Image (cartoon, grey):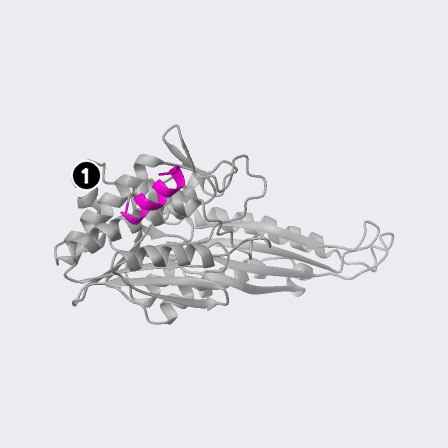
Amino acid sequence: MTPQKNVRSRAREGDALALARLLVAVPSVNPRIEASGNGEAEIAARSAELLEGWGFDVSLTEPERGRPNVVGRIGEGSRSLMFNGHLDTVGVAGMTIDPFGAEVRDGRLWGRGSCDMKGGVAALLSAAAALARWGPPNELIVALTADEEHASTGMAGLTESGVRADAAVVCEPTGLAVMPAHKGFVWVEAGFSGRAAHGSRPDQGMDAILHAAEFLVAMAEYEESLFERAPHPLLGWGSIHAGTISGGAAPSVYPEHCEVVVERRTLPHESPETVMGELAAVVAGLGEQARAGAALRMTLERPGTEVPEASPLVQGLLKAIAGRGGDPAIEGMTAWVDAAFLNQSGTPAVCFGPGSIAQAHSADEWIAVDEIETCARVLEDFGRGFLSGGR
């Protein structure tokens, strides 16, 4: 049997590493990030085939044309558990290794998506295969979604379609820590108007860029005030930074307009409306000219969410980690993740998966092989307890 055929054979048996190698070898670059990206169609078909082989009832839907979600269900009963992961990856430009070679070397699996998050998807699939053989007394749902790396159209479509569960584990890379809380964000365009004039005529010109600079100085003071607030026990403080700035036509012309796009990272209790109100107060404190030509517009927001640490979901995962000889740890996820959609739709969701977020999107992306297997077995143990009605 050739090595490639051996990987496919072991993947069908539910072997965690073989599943990870199989997934990494299938290009699934998000075409919204890299125009030449293949998208999720092939990897979704491979995943669906595996799930069907293990006895799952599988459906594929397309929240965006050619960008499928995969949902597999097995078991019946009043209780349900979801394992979730995304199928897309970021682009491969600038990578220093074969992005789809799926090479195992030095105890690591190398390739694009190995860490974010095909290692996690492999772990949940391995656990799903084992739980299917066991025969769950309640329902296990495997939900694999598209487009997480760009706009989360896959997860949005999944929740809008009514897919729900009593609990969900999103297998993003957490280093095998349980992460029940994560930050959200608000993107805001701050526009400032001036008056165009020749650079030699300060009596006629008004500098929009200078107005934006005044706003940035005030914004830094606003951020300092955020750090004076009581921190979240897992996430610390909210923050704000300027992401982009544009304005002006030429060195010899007073700039008529300047736009700053800022990102405010939010805590679970902070709403977009609160953020916009706070930024409006920042603008209100500017000088008369800067204030007069200022306008704020929210362009995108994603909520921070959290699940209580005392919940059966969090405590069950911690127990399963300890049962496999691990060191149970609860940490905060500083990045925004798709778990927010699940929490908002009524499915309590936490992040737990193999790999370090520091390796995600890197030029030589990799994941520790032993973490994939450990995650798979923890998920299996947790699934058995949760679906049996235990805590």
Magenta stretch, residue numbers: 1-14
* Any part of residue 319 in sight: yes
**Residue 364: percent from left, percent from top:** 49, 36
Q: Pick out the residue farthest to the top.
A: 106
Q: Quadrant of the N terminus?
A: top left
Left or right of 256 on screen, residue 51: left
Q: Nearer the viewer, residue 176 or 271?
A: 176
Q: Position of residue 95 (x, y in %)?
A: 55, 38
Viewer-closest of 15 and 387? 15
Give me the residue at 16% from left, 68% from top: 78
Q: Quadrant of residue 319?
A: top left
Q: Residue at x 46, y 40 (%)?
A: 111
Amino acid identity at mark 1: Arg
In front here: 103 or 252? 103
For the residue labelled by badge 1, is the local secondary structure a helix, a strand or a loop?
Answer: loop
Q: Is residue 168 magenta?
A: no
Percent position of residue 306, x then y: 31, 56
Q: From the image, which quarter does the C terminus lie in?
A: bottom left
Identify the residue position indicated by label 1 in the image.
324
Residue 170 versus residue 124: which sits nearer the camera?
124
Seen at 48% across and 46% down, the residue is 224
Main SS class of the magenta portion in the image:
helix
Residue at point 33%, 52% (across, down): 181
From what the image shows, is residue 284 above or below residue 310? below
